[in-house]
Image (cartoon, rainbow, N blue to C red):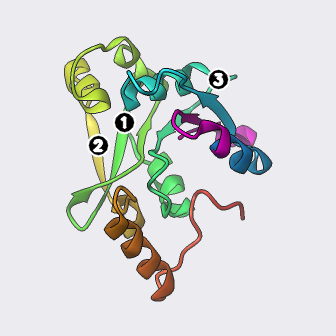
Amino acid sequence: NIRYGKPEAGREEIVAAAGYRGGELERCLAPLGVRVVRNRRFRETQMFDSLKLGIAALTGPWDVLFLLPGDVPLIRAGTLRAMMEQPGQAVRPVWNGRGGHPLMVRPEGLSGLLDYRGPDGLRGAVSARGLTVTDFPVEDRGCTLDADTREDWEEIRAVLHCGEKQRTAHQRP
């Protein structure tokens, strides 16, 4: 899931890179204005390869790029706005000492990342490129909640049902 924008121009584009069940995802996201790019080689590629496809599909210049896994659904929109105010080539939200998502990258930070072909995907690319990532403390537990397992999903549901419901970056105001 890739978000980018030129906030002063009121422009935002959301691109989701999808592999397995990409058609279903596209049918669900298209009405929300999300463009889906299909990684038809998802069985033999890594998530970082899908990320590169999504970035390549962006249609215009951008000031910030949010690299967000699709299974991290509870990021507060205010967290994204606050991250955009932080200096640096790349910014990562940190909640309660835990690094979270999304990684926000400015154009100068992206240089060289997309050419990376080594291990560990985006993390490996960031390390090999020597990109400095600024950790930004946030009061947003959602940046650390992902839905990899049934237990993760149950935790997300519990957060939503126990009064921690919040407007997320995926919801339009």
Please, is residue 3 above or below residue 62 in the view? below
Tell me the amino acid under the disc marked 1. Answer: Ala
Residue 76 drawn at (x, y percent): 51, 64
Please, is residue 81 above or below residue 134 in the view? below
Residue 3 painted magenta: yes
Residue 150 drawn at (x, y percent): 36, 66
Q: How many marks?
A: 3
Q: How far apart are marks 2 and 1 (CA)?
A: 6 Å
Image check: 22 left or right of 155? Answer: right
Q: Residue at x 46, y 29 (%)?
A: 51
Tell me the amino acid under the disc marked 2. Answer: Thr
- Graded by Cα atoms within 10 Å as few (under 14), some (14 to 19) or many (20 or more), the crowding at tag 2 reads some
Image check: 115 left or right of 9? Answer: left
Whether the residues at callouts 1 and 3 have beta carbons within 8 Å, the answer is no
Tell me the amino acid under the disc marked 3. Answer: Pro
Q: Give the range drawn in magenta.
A: 1-24
Nearest to N terminus: mark 2 or mark 1? 1
Of residues 5 and 143, the one drawn nearer to the viewer in this rendering: 143
Q: Which residue is drawn at 38% across and 50% down?
A: 101
Residue 121 drawn at (x, y percent): 29, 28
Q: Distance between the residues labelled 3 and 2?
A: 23 Å
Q: Distance between the residues labelled 1 and 3?
A: 17 Å
- Graded by Cα atoms within 10 Å as few (under 14), some (14 to 19) or many (20 or more), the crowding at tag 3 reads few
Q: Residue at x 61, y 57 (%)?
A: 170
- Single out the residue that lies furthest toward the right: 31
Q: Mark 2 points at which residue?
A: 134
* SS category of the residue bearing label 1: strand
Residue 141 painted magenta: no
Q: Name the residue under label 3.
A: 61
Which circle marks residue 90 in the picture? 1
